[in-house]
Amino acid sequence: MKKIGIMTTGGDCSGLNTVINRIVLGATNRGWRMVGIIDGTDGLCVRPANVIEMNTDTVPIERARLAGSFLHNGNACTMMNFESAVKNGRMKQFNKMLHDSLTALKLDALVLIGGNGSFSLSWKNRDIYSGLSLVCIPKTIDFDIPLTDRTIGFDTATNELVKYCDQLLLTARSHHRWFVVQSMGRECGRLALNAGVAIGADAIIIPEIKFSVDNLIKHIRGVDHDYGIIMVSEGITIRGSSGRPADMISRKLTAAGIMNRAAFPDYIQRAGDTVAGDRILAAKMATAALDAIENRETYVMTALRGNECVTIPLSEFYESGDIARDPNIPDLYTSNAYVEPDDPLLGVAGAMNIYIGDRK
C-alpha cells in the first residue's frame, strides 16, 4: 500500500480544501494511505512531524467548498526558520532537517499544493525530497505561475473581487463618485485585468503596462458618466509618490477635482466559497497528480493545457518564467508569469473603452 503525504504552503485561497478532498477521495479509491502535514513546512520543523491520518471524513464533501486550508499553510515560524538558516549559513542543516522529517514519515510520494515561491524553492532545494515522488499542484489567486492555463483559486478570487465592486458601483452611482479599487496580485496584473473587464471598469492599471496619470485623468473626464470603478493592481508604482497604489491614484484624482474614494477588498479576495470552475480544476489536477504518482513521476507540476490536465517537469516551470529575486524570502529567486503584451483580454478591454495604460 502506497503512503502519500499532502501539504499546503504559501498564501491561502479558495480551492485548497477542494483539492485536498479530491486527492483523498482518489487515493482512497486506489487503496492508498494518506497523511496530511499540518502547517506546511512548519509541520516538518518539529519532531515528530506534525501529521494527521486522512480519510474521506477528514474534509467531508460538504466542507470542501470552504476557503482556507484544513491543513493550514504555516505561520511566521517558516519565515523565521528560513531567514535564520540563511543568515547563519545553515541552509544545508535546515534542508537536512526537512529531508529527515520526510524520511521518517516513510512516504512514497508527497503532493505539495503551493505557489511559484514554493515551487521555485522546492526545485532549487530538491534534495529535500529525494527518495520520494514530489508532485506539485499550482494554487494562487495571483495566477503568476508559468506553463499552466489556470491556477486553483484564481476564478474564485476574481468572483469575490467582482462581487465587491458590484456593491461599490451602487453607492458610486448614488454619490456621483469614483472608486479606486486595489486588487491583490503582487507584480502580476491578471486578477485586476480579469475582474476589471468583468465589472466594466473604466480604467485598469496593472504593473505590466506603463500608464500616465494625466492620461488616466483625461480618460475619466472624457466618459459620459460621473461614477465608476478604477481597478488598480497592488504592484504598480508612481514615480515620486509613495504609499498604497490606490491611495496614490486617489490623491491624484482628488487634486484634479475628480470625486473619488480608495477601496481595499484585501483578504476577501482569498476567501469565498469555491466556485465551480475552481472545483472542477481541483478535481482535474488531483487526478493528474495521483496518475503521476502511479506512474512514478517526480519533480513535476500539474498544469492545465486547454481542457486537459498534464504534468510538466519542475525544471521547465522554473526555466520558462521570468526569474526574479523573491522580495519576501532571502536568497530565493522565483519563476514568475505576467500578463503578456498580446493577451487577448487587453484587446477586449480596449474595445470596451477601458483605459489600460499607454499601450501601443
Image (spheres, rainbow, N blue to C red):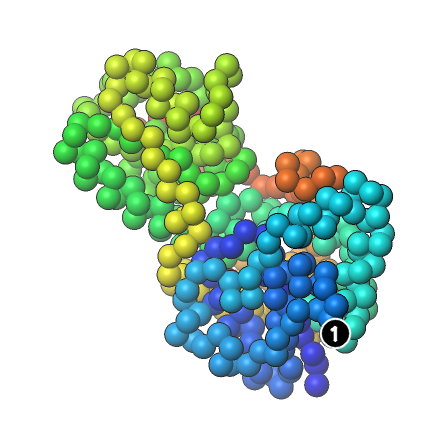
Does 54 appear above or below 135? below
Residue 351 makes an appearance in the image: no
Along the horizontal axis of the image, is 70 left or right of 256? right
Residue 119 drawn at (x, y percent): 67, 52
Depth order, front residue of 287/72: 72
Picture quarter with the N terminus: bottom right
* Residue 145 visible somewhere in the drawing: yes
Name the spot of residue 210 as percent of width and height, x first: 48, 22
Residue at the extreme left: 174
Q: Residue at point 55% right, 62% down? A: 72
Residue at 84%, 43% (x, y): give it.
89
Task: Tell me: residue 215, above or below residue 128.
Answer: above
Mark 1 burial class by Cα count in 10 Å: few <14, some 14-19, many 20+: some
- The residue shown at (49%, 28%) is 236
Three-letter amino acid code at disc 1? Leu
Nearest to the observer: residue 310 or residue 128: 128
**Towards the viewer: 196 or 258:** 258
Quadrant of the image occupied by residue 98:
bottom right
Q: Is label 1 in a helix, a strand or a loop?
A: helix
**Which of the 4 quarters of the picture holds residue 298?**
bottom right
Count of numbered circles on the image: 1
For residue 151, side relative to residue 42 (left or right): left
Where residue 167 appears, as percent x and y from the top left, is 24, 44
Q: Position of residue 216 (x, y in %)?
A: 35, 20
- Residue 227 placement, left or right of 43: left
Task: Identify the residue at horizontal 44%, vertical 70% (top origin).
Answer: 64
Up the image or down, 351 lies above or below 24; here it is: above
Question: What residue would you read off at disc 1?
Answer: 105
Q: Is residue 224 left or right of residue 157?
A: left
